[in-house]
């Protein structure tokens, strides 16, 4: 009788463990709360092909933060697409840019930016982005 009851009890325990582990995952860590990372895209809305990313990095008081390495990864919201990854170049105090970020397909994209400072502090920002078809109407 004891061995017949084991499979009946094992399944609910496994389900409970799966639910608890899923709940622990939480939100993606953002990094240093004293840093603010933001991005603007030109043109707006972005179209398939090259776009300019204008990135700002400031502290919470609004002072520009210099010397960061900023990597941007663009992913489609669905699986199966190769991510687009590029590194921003410093353009001024707290200002960074990518002049030729290549959106490869129209649709919903997620841009994930990560800025890392020489002292090891870092911050991450995520920006959902809708990319339209090519300018001139061709998809």
Image (cartoon, helix red, strand yellow):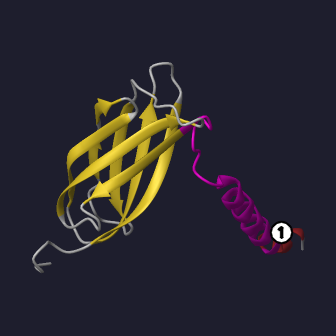
Residue drawn at the location 54% of the way across and 37% of the way down: 62
**Viewport quadrant of the C terminus:** bottom left
Looking at this view, name the residue that lies furthest to the front. 62
- The x and y percentages for residue 111 are 38, 55
Residue drawn at the location 49% of the way across and 36% of the way down: 58
**Viewport quadrant of the N terminus:** bottom right
Q: Compare residues 98 and 21 and report the one nearer the observer.
A: 98
Q: Residues within 10 Å of mark 1 (few under 14, many from 20)?
A: few
Looking at this view, name the residue that lies furthest to the bottom. 137
Q: Is residue 119 left or right of residue 93?
A: right
Picture layout, residue 103 above or below residue 53: below
Give residue 110's quadrant in the image: bottom left
Can residue 87 be seen by looking at this rendering? no
Q: Give the range drawn in magenta.
A: 8-35
* In magenta segment, residue 27: yes
Q: Compare residues 28 and 32 and report the one nearer the observer.
A: 32
Can residue 81 be seen by looking at this rendering? yes
- Element at badge 1? helix
Picture layout, residue 35 above or below residue 2: above
Picture layout, residue 27 above or below residue 80: above
Q: Main SS of the magenta segment?
A: helix
Q: Compare residues 57 and 6 and report the one nearer the observer.
A: 57
- The x and y percentages for residue 19 are 72, 65
Number of dots carrying numbers: 1
Residue drawn at the location 29% of the way across and 38% of the way down: 88
Give residue 10's quadrant in the image: bottom right
- The x and y percentages for residue 32 are 59, 35
Residue drawn at the location 34% of the way across and 58% of the way down: 75
* In magenta segment, residue 34: yes
Residue on which the image places disc 1 = 3
Q: In this view, does 117 lie to the left or right of 129?
A: right
């Amino acid at each position: 009788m004891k061995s017949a009851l084991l499979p009946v009890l094992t399944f609910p325990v496994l389900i409970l463990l799966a639910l608890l582990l899923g709940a622990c995952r939480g939100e993606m860590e953002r990094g240093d709360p004293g840093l603010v990372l933001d991005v603007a895209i030109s043109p707006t809305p972005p179209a398939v092909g090259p776009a300019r990313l204008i990135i700002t990095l400031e502290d919470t008081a609004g002072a520009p933060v210099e010397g960061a390495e900023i990597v941007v990864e663009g992913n489609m919201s669905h699986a199966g697409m190769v991510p687009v990854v590029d590194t921003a170049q410093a353009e001024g105090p707290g200002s960074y840019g990518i002049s030729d970020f290549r959106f490869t397909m129209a649709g919903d994209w997620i841009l994930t930016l990560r800025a890392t400072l020489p002292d090891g502090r870092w911050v991450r920002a995520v920006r959902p982005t809708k990319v339209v078809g090519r300018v001139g109407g061709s998809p």
